[in-house]
Every structure is written in C-alpha cells, then in structure tokens.
Amino acid sequence: MAQVQEERMTWARRCRLYARQRPVVLVIGAVVAALLIMALGAGVTGALGAAGAGDGGVLVTRSDAGSSERGAAEVEHDDAASDDGVSGSEGKLEKPEVIVVDVAGAVGAPSLVTLQADSRVGDAIEAAGGFAADADAARVNRAAKLQDGQQVYVPRMGEAGGGGSGAVAPDVGASAQGTAAADGPVNINRASESDLDALPGVGPSTARAIVEDRDANGPFSTIEDLMRVSGIGEKKFEKLKSSICV
C-alpha cells in the first residue's frame, strides 16, 4: 500500500515538472520550426534563381551590360577629352625664339643676322660689325624693337632720307613688315606700302600703285619720277615732294 502511494506521488511530481518545462519545450519547437521554414525558403529562392539564370538572367544581365556600356562610354569620353586637350595645346601657335634680319648700309659687315626674338636695332648693328666710320649714328634709333624679316638700314653721313630715325625698313616691294617712324623724308625706293599710304594725299590705292611701279620698272632715280605712277599728277606731287626722297 505504501509503495502504491509512493508511485502515485512520483507520477504527480513528474506531471508538475513536465507542466513547468512545457513552455521551454514549446519555445524550442517554435525555433526549430522557424529554422526549417527559413531553410525551405532559401532552397526555393535558390531554385528560382537557377531557373531565372537558365532563362537568360534578363534583369541581372541587362544591368551588368548597362553598367559596362556606360563605363565604356565614359572611358571613350575621357579619351576624347584627353585627345582634344592634346590637339588643342598642339594647335596653339608659338612665337619664334629667334628672328632673322637684314642689316645694310653703314655697318662693318652688312649681312643677314640671327638674333633672339626680343632683340632691338642696336643688337642687329652690333651683330653686323657695329657702325662704320661714316655712319650717321645720330639718326638711328637703337632701341627700336625688331621683327622677323625686317631690314635695318644705317644711313651714311650726308645721305638723304635713308632709313629714318628708326633705321628699320622692309625689303623693297614688301608691305607686310612694319617700319619705324621716320623724322625726315620718306625714301620712296625703300618705303613700304603702309609708309607710302601715310604720306599726304596718298591713299591705299596710290600707295599700292607706287609699289607695283617700283617693282615693275625699278627704283626711282629722282623724286620727280614718282609722277610716272598712275594717279600722281603735278598737283599731288607738289604736296608730296617735301616729304619724300630717293
């Protein structure tokens, strides 16, 4: 009898212990169930992804292709910009580092001389041997700046006209090169078209006619020979004769 009662008490104890542990068991069961559901979901997603890849992977492939195309386009754009930058820098015109001028007249060694681009008349004269003994140095502006292709002419003592105070004149017949201003009369055998255009009563067309006549018929022997040029009559010559020489 006592043994039966003890067994009943043991069973009752087990029931109470099970009742207390039941929430824990339920929680563990719920966690296990959730893990199983997640595993099943991952498997289904993987299967769908594999199926999508088998069909061509449209979305992923297009996205990658689009990125690749955009990347290639950006690289091409950068290359084009770089090429433009190089060609632009190459296209810029640079000033020459040296110039060549013709030094003539009363100098030690009349010749073509090569000088630095920022040289002046005095540098050209020195490169050509300096002033000759009969040079009229007072009429030379040694500070005048030079340009490539100009002529530096040093007048002799007593010479009329010459190259003027600047002592710079272009080749006969050339009109592109500049000349320095002259205080005295303009030498019509050396003056450029622009110099002749500055004379009183002479416009661009007459200046051009003088240069063309000089090139075709040779230099003028006297200032009166200027009247052989079409457009220059006695009346216009009277205005000019005090401003010109040969």
Image: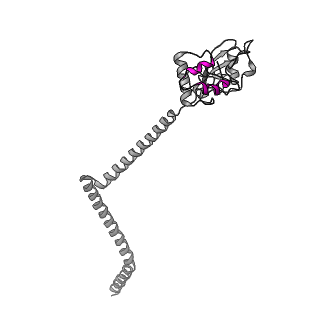
Q: Height in image: 162 above or below 88?
A: above
Q: Nearer the viewer, residue 142 or 7?
A: 142
Q: Please tell me in which quadrant of the rendered image residue 199 appears.
A: top right
- Specify how the rendered protein is coloured: one colour
x and y percentages locating residue 212 in the rendered image:
52, 22
**Number of marks in picture:** 0
Asked if residue 119 shows in the view, the reply is no
Residue at the image point whose x is 69% and y is 21% from the top: 123
Residues drawn in magenta: 222-246
Decide if residue 148 is on the left or right side of residue 154: left
On-image quarter of the N terminus: bottom left
Residue 79 x/y as whole percent: 44, 40
5, 162: nearer the viewer: 162
Residue in view at x 53 percent, y 16 percent = 217
Report x, y in % for residue 211.
55, 22
Q: Is residue 27 shown left or right of residue 141?
A: left
Q: What secondary structure is the stretch in magenta mostly built from? A: helix
For image coordinates 61% across by 31% down, the residue present is 201
